[in-house]
Structures are given as C-alpha cells and as structure tokens.
Image (cartoon, rainbow, N blue to C red):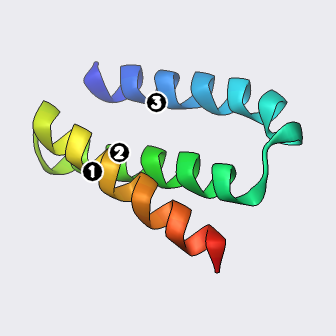
Amino acid sequence: MKTKFIAAVVTSISLLGLGGCATMDRTTVGTVGGAVVGGLVGSAVGGTGATILGAGAGAYLGNQAAKR
C-alpha cells in the first residue's frame, strides 16, 4: 500500500512539474530534481528525518551540479 501511494505521489508531482519546467532555468531544475531523488533515497533508507535530510542534501548537490 505504501509503495503504491509513493508511486502515485511521485507520478503526480512529475506530471505537475513538467508543465512548469518550460520556464525554469537549469539550476532550478537541478535543485528540484536533486531534492526529489534525495527525498526518495532518504525515504527508502529511514523515516521522516532521513527523508528530509536526503531531500536537503539532494537539493544542494543538484544545485551545485547544475552550476557546472
């Protein structure tokens, strides 16, 4: 049940995000993408705290990678 819910949320956010990506610059896309991936990894590894830390770390790394 939890896996189906997470998949539905990720799909919904992805579809909503695609509409807004037309006006986003590369750094913003990297930050958002990193936050999503980091949040998913954090969620798989631990609880709420790990999800928040993963999203924060992913956002930072995605932002830095997009700047290069």
Q: Residue furthest right?
A: 22
Relative to 65, 56 lies left or right: left
Residue 44's place in the image compared with 30, above or below, is above
The residue tagged 1 is 54
Q: CA distance from mark 3 to mark 1?
A: 18 Å
Question: Which numbered marker is on residue 40?
Answer: 2
Q: What x and y, as percent, mark residue 52?
A: 24, 38
For the residues bearing labels 1 and 2, Cβ distance under 8 angstroms: yes
Q: Position of residue 13 (x, y in %)?
A: 59, 26
User: Which type of secondary structure does the marked residue at label 2 adopt?
Assistant: helix
Instruction: Identify which amino acid the numbered label 1 is placed on.
Output: Gly
Residue denoted by label 3 = 7
Amino acid type at mark 2? Leu
Left or right: 15, with 3 as reference point: right
Which of discs 3 and 2 lies nearer the camera? The answer is 2
The amino acid beneath tag 3 is Ala
> Seen in the image, is 54 located left or right of residue 28?
left
Give yes or no for contact between labels 3 and 1 (Cβ–Cβ under 8 Å).
Answer: no
Q: State the image coordinates of residue 2 (x, y, percent, origin top left).
A: 27, 23
- Which of marks 1 and 3 precedes in the sequence? 3
Q: Residue at x 36, y 52 (%)?
A: 38
Which of 25 and 42 lies nearest the eye of the viewer? 25
Q: Secondary structure at mark 3?
A: helix
* Apparent side of residue 32 relative to residue 28 in the rendered image (left or right): left
Q: Quadrant of the C terminus?
A: bottom right
- Residue, x 83% and y 28% (percent of image)? 19
Q: Residues within 10 Å of mark 3 (few under 14, many from 20)?
A: few
- Neighbours of disc 2 within 10 Å: few (<14), some (14-19), many (20+): some
> What residue lies at 34% left-to-right and 46% top-to-bottom?
55
